[in-house]
Image (spheres, grey):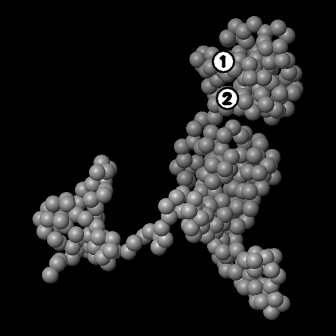
């Protein structure tokens, strides 16, 4: 009688033996690695001694066959991937409010009343705990902030994952949901290197800058995060687009920033102020002059900041600027 081993034993079929990254598992009886898989019997058998390494294997594939990619997509019945930006990760069922069947016909009055009761209890079971209610409110606020900031999808997903980590570690207790989700959005922008300032996040989240900065520092400390430093060159394209400046001005501004960084005059200074000052210099040199007030309004800094950074760069880099 053939001997068997535990079902969780790692196996390796003949089809996988050519793959260099496959783990080689030897037969527990004779030590050879020549094993085959019988999909009809659901067994893995050693070809040398006949030992059954695994039996009653479950076929994880579909019960249907497809010969083209279009046919495979048409027959697939899997749902959407996990979405961390939804409080239930997109895994729960939603009953439509239109009261129509699959063919678009209206439901009978008795069935419509039954569907109404099912819909009511289904909504209640989706949000049945305090954590679910917290996540539902937070994800709604996340949709609003990211929509107003026009940040890409990866930033939104990173922010949702960060907020879920804060909920798991009970960091949300005693703090407002709006402040913590805004801090997660700012941290997500920093992690994905999307140029957004703390003032912009505070403006769209209805949270003052001091509270937002406090929550952001809490995330860095408790979650042990390592975020990259914001570079002034990241803000140049966005500011230039808002000011309707050409690509020549952007290239000139980035060249000035690189020279300033080599001289060491950018260390410890606000990157938005540096980007605004270099755009002011580059716009004058390229003949697309913009006033300090216009640039300061777009960069959300004061005219004094633009003027101080501008004077320092002209003096250290010895730039020729005709006022």
- Image x and y of residue 51, in percent: 17, 72
Residue for badge 2: 232
Instruction: State how far apart marks 1 and 2 are (Cα).
Output: 12 Å
**Which quadrant, please, contains the C terminus?**
top right
Q: Quadrant of residue 84?
A: bottom right
Work out whether mark 1 precedes mark 2 in sequence or the reverse, and give the earlier one: 2
Residue 171 in sight in this render: no
On screen, residue 3 versus residue 109, left or right, reads left
Residue 72 in sight in this render: yes
| Outermost front residue | 67
Give 191 or 318, whichever is nearer the viewer.
191
Residue at the image position 67 percent from the left and 80 percent from the top: 125
Residue at the image position 85 percent from the left and 18 percent from the top: 289
* 250 versus 87 height, above or below: above
Give 96 or 152, whichever is nearer the viewer.
96
Q: Which mark is residue 255?
A: 1
Residue at the image position 79 percent from the left and 31 percent from the top: 241
- Image x and y of residue 45, in percent: 22, 69
Residue at the image position 73 percent from the left and 51 percent from the top: 146
- Image x and y of residue 3, in percent: 17, 77
Q: Give the mark count.
A: 2
Q: Which mark is residue 170?
A: none
**Which quadrant, please, contains the N terminus?**
bottom left
* Label 2 neighbour load within 10 Å: few <14, some 14-19, many 20+: many
Give 37 or 223, whichever is nearer the viewer.
37
Q: Secondary structure at mark 1?
A: helix
* Label 1 neighbour load within 10 Å: few <14, some 14-19, many 20+: some
Which of pointers 1 and 2 indicates the residue nearer the eye? Answer: 1
Q: Secondary structure at mark 2?
A: helix
- Image x and y of residue 173, in percent: 65, 64
């Amino acid at each position: 009688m053939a001997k068997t081993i535990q079902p969780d034993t790692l196996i390796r079929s003949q089809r996988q033996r050519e793959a260099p990254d496959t783990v080689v598992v030897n037969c527990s009886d004779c030590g050879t690695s020549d094993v085959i898989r019988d999909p009809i019997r659901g067994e893995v058998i050693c070809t040398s001694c006949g030992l059954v390494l695994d039996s009653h294997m479950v076929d994880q594939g579909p019960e249907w066959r497809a010969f083209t990619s279009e046919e495979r997509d048409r027959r697939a019945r899997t749902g959407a991937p996990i979405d961390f930006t939804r409080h239930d990760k997109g895994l729960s069922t939603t009953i439509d409010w239109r009261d129509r069947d699959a063919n678009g016909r209206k439901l009978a009055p008795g069935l419509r009343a039954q569907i109404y009761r099912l819909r009511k209890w289904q909504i209640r079971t989706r949000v049945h705990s305090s954590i679910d209610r917290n996540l539902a409110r937070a994800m709604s606020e996340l949709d609003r902030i990211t929509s107003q900031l026009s940040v890409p999808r990866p930033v939104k997903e990173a922010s949702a994952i960060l907020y879920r980590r804060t909920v798991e570690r009970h960091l949300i207790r005693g703090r407002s949901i709006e402040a913590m989700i805004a801090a997660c959005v700012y941290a997500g922008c920093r992690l994905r290197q999307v140029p957004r300032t703390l003032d912009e996040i505070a403006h769209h989240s209805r949270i003052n800058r001091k509270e937002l900065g406090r929550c952001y520092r809490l995330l860095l400390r408790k979650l042990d995060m390592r975020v990259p430093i914001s570079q002034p060159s990241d803000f140049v394209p966005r500011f230039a687009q808002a000011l309707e400046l050409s690509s020549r001005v952007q290239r000139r501004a980035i060249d000035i920033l690189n020279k300033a960084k080599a001289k060491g005059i950018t260390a410890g200074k606000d990157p938005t102020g540096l980007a605004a000052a270099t755009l002011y210099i580059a716009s004058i040199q390229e003949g697309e002059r913009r006033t300090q007030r216009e640039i300061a309004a777009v960069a959300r800094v004061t005219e004094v900041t633009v003027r101080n950074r501008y004077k320092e760069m002209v003096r250290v880099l010895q730039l020729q600027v005709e006022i």
